[in-house]
């Protein structure tokens, strides 16, 4: 699939902008602070229905305005389609002109893989970024997973509120919330475990010389002890840990506290790996994400690269560019460099204006 056109109205530093993309390779260049990343952010909205850069959605609205609108035309499986996201006090989303009721109806509709410099810290940073990586990946190939996540965090919020208040009249309802949390949570764990197994079977097939020189393996670390797929096991742990949870005021066990470790040639690279090994590993994880999405959906995902190539040395940049040529690519960078030698469109960004060359 690919994006054909993007229209921005009152989005970040863009009052109004139309961009028509090449279905293969697109390089968006310009000085820092001109609005390059804003374009990547706007496109990614159609994958997740929200920004990957901010928590307060109103931050995407142009400073002088009270609303913003993002419109896009896509083509998938040789069939055109359109989408629109409007954000003001509330958000509304339309697919092919039809207003949708739930965000889950958008997730999985348009397949994209985003890669920013932050992802290079996937290994070094805390478990939150790794949970986000695996959650975003699974949601694109199994939209039901995204629905489960929404429901899980809704129930978790209710349970945590009760734990914080320590009100006896509310504590009696914990059985209800624990039952729901264990039902949804065990399913999330099961799908995460399956996804990690799939990554393990794919990531080592991505090699520059068709020889496996660096064997990468992910190990799922659920916070649930024992059989994490067993609802009753999870439920029993929630019940037995209530006193501790009330002391902390939060739920200490469940998918919201999961993690995974990454080994390369049987070495935990977070502890013992070099900076170069970590970057190679993350590159391959992102590439395997692309390959699995293609396998599961039948469509090549759009690849969004926000100033990532400048973070790589020449060898890794060459390896990465060789691997990504077969899908639509949208790259931002500060300098106009000849990343590709064929079928590439260039766009210069200056002061919130995009000029196609």
Image (cartoon, rainbow, N blue to C red):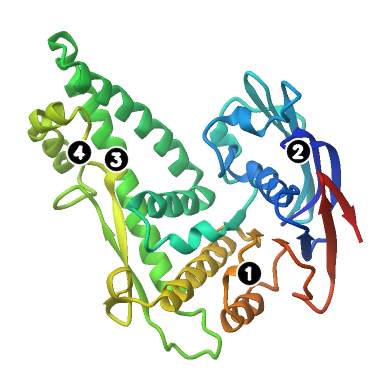
Question: Are dots 1 and 3 in contact, CB under 8 Å?
Answer: no
- Residue, disc 4: 252
| 17 or 110, nearer to the observer | 17
Percent of width and height locating residue 124: 37, 62
Percent of width and height locating residue 61: 69, 30
Question: Are dots 4 and 1 in contact, CB under 8 Å?
Answer: no
- Residue, disc 2: 13
Sequence-first disc among 4 and 1: 4
Question: Are dots 3 and 2 in contact, CB under 8 Å?
Answer: no
| Residues packed near mark 1 inside 10 Å, few (<14), some (14 to 19) or many (20 plus) | some
Q: Is residue 300 above or below residue 233?
A: below
Quarter of the rendering containing residue 173: top left
Q: CA distance from mark 3 to mark 2?
A: 40 Å
Residue 330, visible in the rendered structure: no
Sequence-first disc among 3 and 2: 2
- Residue, disc 3: 185
- Residue, disc 1: 310
């Amino acid at each position: 699939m690919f994006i054909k056109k993007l229209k921005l109205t009152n989005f970040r530093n863009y009052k109004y902008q139309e961009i028509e993309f090449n279905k293969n390779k697109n390089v968006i260049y310009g000085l820092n602070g001109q609005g390059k990343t804003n374009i990547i952010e706007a496109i990614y909205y159609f994958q997740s229905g929200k920004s990957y850069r901010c928590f307060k959605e109103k931050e995407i609205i142009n400073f002088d305005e009270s609303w913003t609108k993002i419109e896009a035309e896509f083509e998938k499986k040789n069939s055109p389609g359109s989408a629109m996201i409007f954000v003001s006090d509330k958000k509304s989303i339309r697919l092919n002109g039809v207003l949708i009721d739930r965000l889950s109806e958008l997730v999985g509709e348009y397949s994209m893989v985003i890669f920013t410099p932050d992802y290079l810290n996937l290994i070094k940073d805390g478990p939150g970024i790794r949970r986000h990586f695996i959650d975003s990946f699974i949601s694109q190939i199994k939209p039901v997973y995204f629905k489960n996540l929404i429901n899980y965090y809704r129930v978790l919020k209710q349970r945590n509120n009760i734990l914080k208040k320590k009100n006896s009249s509310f504590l009696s309802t914990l059985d209800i919330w624990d039952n729901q949390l264990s039902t949804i949570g065990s399913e999330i764990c099961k799908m995460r475990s399956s996804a990690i197994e799939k990554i393990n079977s794919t990531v080592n097939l991505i090699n520059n010389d068709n020889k496996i020189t660096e064997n990468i393996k992910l190990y799922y670390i659920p916070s649930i002890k024992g059989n994490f797929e067993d609802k009753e096991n999870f439920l029993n742990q929630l019940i037995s840990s209530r006193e501790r949870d009330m002391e902390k005021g939060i739920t200490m066990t469940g998918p919201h506290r999961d993690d995974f470790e990454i080994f390369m040639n049987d070495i935990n690279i977070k502890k013992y790996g070099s900076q170069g090994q970590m970057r190679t590993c993350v590159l391959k994880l992102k590439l395997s994400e692309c390959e699995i999405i293609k396998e599961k959906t039948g469509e090549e995902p759009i690849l969004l690269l926000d100033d990532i190539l400048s973070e790589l040395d020449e060898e890794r940049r060459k390896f990465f560019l060789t691997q990504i040529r077969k899908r639509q690519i949208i790259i931002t960078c500060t300098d106009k460099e000849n990343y590709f030698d064929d079928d590439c469109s260039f766009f210069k960004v200056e002061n919130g204006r995009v000029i196609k060359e």
